[in-house]
Amino acid sequence: MNLSQELLASMYRKMMKIRKFEQRVSELFAQGMVPGFVHLYIGEEATAVGVCENLKDTDYITSTHRGHGHLIAKGGELKYMMAELFGRKTGYCKGKGGSMHIADAKIGILGANGIVGAGLPISVGSGLSARMRGTDQVTVCFFGDGASNQGTFHEAMNMASIWRLPVIFVCENNLYGISMRQDRHQAIADISDRAQAYGFPGITVDGNDVLAVYEVAHEAVKRAREGAGPTLIECKTYRWRGHFEGDPTTYRAKEELEEWMAKDPIPRFARYLEENGYASRKELEEIERSVESEVQQAIDFAEKSDLPDEADAVTDVYSDLVEEGRAR
Amino acid sequence: MPEKLYIDALREGLREEMLRDENVFIIGEDVGLYGGAFGVTKGLFQEFGEDRVKDTPISEAAIAGAAVGAALCGMRPVAEIMFFDFFTIAMDQLVNQGAKNRYMFGGKAKVPMVIRGPMGCGTGAAAQHSQSFPAVFAHFPGLKVVMPSTPYDVKGLIKASIRDDNPVVFAEHKLLYRVKGEVPEEEYIVPLGKADIKRKGKDITIVAGSIMVIRALEAAKQLEQEGIDVEVVDPRTLKPLDMGTIVDSVKKTGRVIIVEDDPMSFGWGAEVAAGIASSSAFDYLDAPIKRLAGLDIPIPYNPNLEKHAVPQVEDIVKAIKDILE
């Protein structure tokens, strides 16, 4: 595929943005600045970026508990994300959702999701809405290998198939459903095989190769926009961190992690850009520094932001009713 | 005023809202070509076409999830779940997604969807096709819960529910489908959160919902022969719950019995009883608050056992006589 220098640079910047954001979140979590759970995306950046670079602002995504990468790739703003992780009033969700529930309807982000496999039926609904309103919007539904064993996976793929909905199912096979290695949680090697059972194309791609992911997603998005129905894309990748920050990861061998770290999608893409004359080392380093400063600004913004007031706890439950707290 | 069946009034409400707003659509199992398992959506497929009356595979989780997703994207889906018991299969999408989305997203989303279906026993369908449990949903912040008892209410409330910007659980009792009542020709809405006094009286208040309103009114008629003047209050919606109307009625009569179709334990009647006991009506009570509800058993198959599982007219009559003695 012939991609413009501008697009390639944007892809590199976004991958770097995800990496730097996540690395800082990991540090901040260890320092106790971020409450609750965080599930980091480090190592899987090529998948989110390769897919989302094919989308418009008006297109939809549904995301997962490991959602930061998807949100950044779809155009989410770091400062509102970071403020949300800090539980601040200025965060995407006013500090009420946290890492697992960031959404931004203005750019089609229908929410990260704390329930494994729950985004799949929601993507059927957004796909259906685009069809009914007669738009060319597509929905990308991200989920993991673990979610491919939920009932919702099968229900949603079947429904999207019979209605030929503009939905692209992107399975990030990072080899583990929490602690369970893929060969222990299902008897197939390629999750894309399951598409055959629903009568639409399934394709497996190297999820650490951003250009390969881009190309496969490009075709799937085109199919969806043209009304040809859904595609299942399986991106084989690996999460470097545990299932959550603090996970001792006793279930996997150090050698396995090292093997995958050697397949780091970011230097791999940098090499491609340099070797083909799309960017110089210096330019790539500039991108890295500018991203680092953007992440720092996001942290500064979050730290300076106000905490929510107790009174905010009872608003936003309904569009019209306010819970009366303990006044009753 | 013309008399109509509950099921026809419900269908009219759905149809009027589909005509009024092109974003309203129906989704569910056998709702299209077949017209719905109970016939609620009969004819709508022919009138509005297959895109707006969408037949689905037997996949309750995906039906509810598709409704949530479509609602997040600006549509107004009305999902039918064939039997209320099957709501349990759609629980995650309703409870963890639809109900919580607005809050989790900091108020920056709305989920204008209705999910409706027939509950209740009396058809010999046994334990997995007969339970009434609307109160369960009132326990999930973010959901509204409606349980209309008359043709007038079901039409006005389905219209209000469809126009509501929050997810609404709409519980119909299957024995009500064939009940007749007055329904005006002109358009009207019944707002959510407003109880209705179905019968005025001065001796005792019955708070009853759904099918139990019909039984309470029958009991009131019988008791009238014996000089007992019963007031019947129908909350109509469980969430939001109109305690004001209930409290005012109890202050007037000084006695109250709550009649539910759901199993007794942790039912909505307990919420109403607690509300009365902690309200200004407490000082007006001349007798302990009484509850009549379903037994804490799965609904049995045998017709005699089934009848025994939930309050009947004679149970209400007897309970009220006991209170007044």
Image (cartoon, coloured by chain):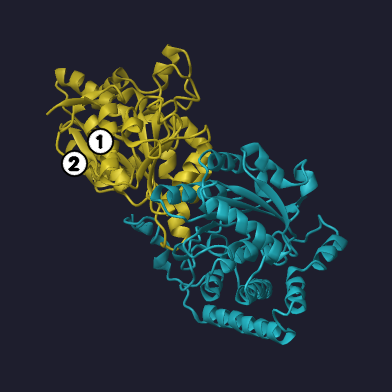
Query: Chain B is shown in which shade?
Result: yellow
Number of residues whose C-alpha sits closer than 10 Å to that of mark 1, classed few (under 14), some (14–19) or many (20 or more) = many
Q: Which amino acid type is shown beneath numbered disc 2?
A: Tyr
Q: Where is residue B232 in the image (x, y as percent from the top left)?
A: 22, 32
Q: Quadrant of residue A34?
A: bottom right
Q: Where is residue B124 in the image (x, y as percent from the top left)?
A: 44, 16
- Report which residue position mark 2 lands on: B188
Number of residues whose C-alpha sits closer than 10 Å to that of mark 2, classed few (under 14), some (14–19) or many (20 or more) = some
State the SS at label 2. Answer: loop
Q: Which amino acid type is shown beneath numbered disc 1?
A: Lys
The chain identifier of the residue carrying mark 1 reads B
Q: Do the residues labelled 2 and 1 touch (CB within 8 Å)?
A: yes
Q: Nearer the viewer, residue A293 or A32?
A: A293
For marks 2 and 1 on the same chain, the one whose residue lies earlier in the sequence? 1
Q: Where is residue A197 in the image (x, y as percent from the top left)?
A: 66, 37
State the SS at label 1. Answer: helix
- Report which residue position mark 1 lands on: B155
Q: Position of residue B172 (x, y in %)?
A: 35, 31
Q: Which of B12 and B276 is in front in this view?
A: B12
Query: Chain A is shown in which shade?
Result: cyan
* Quarter of the picture holding the C terminus of chain B: top left
Q: Nearer the viewer, residue A49 or B291?
A: A49
Q: Residue A58 carries which label?
A: none
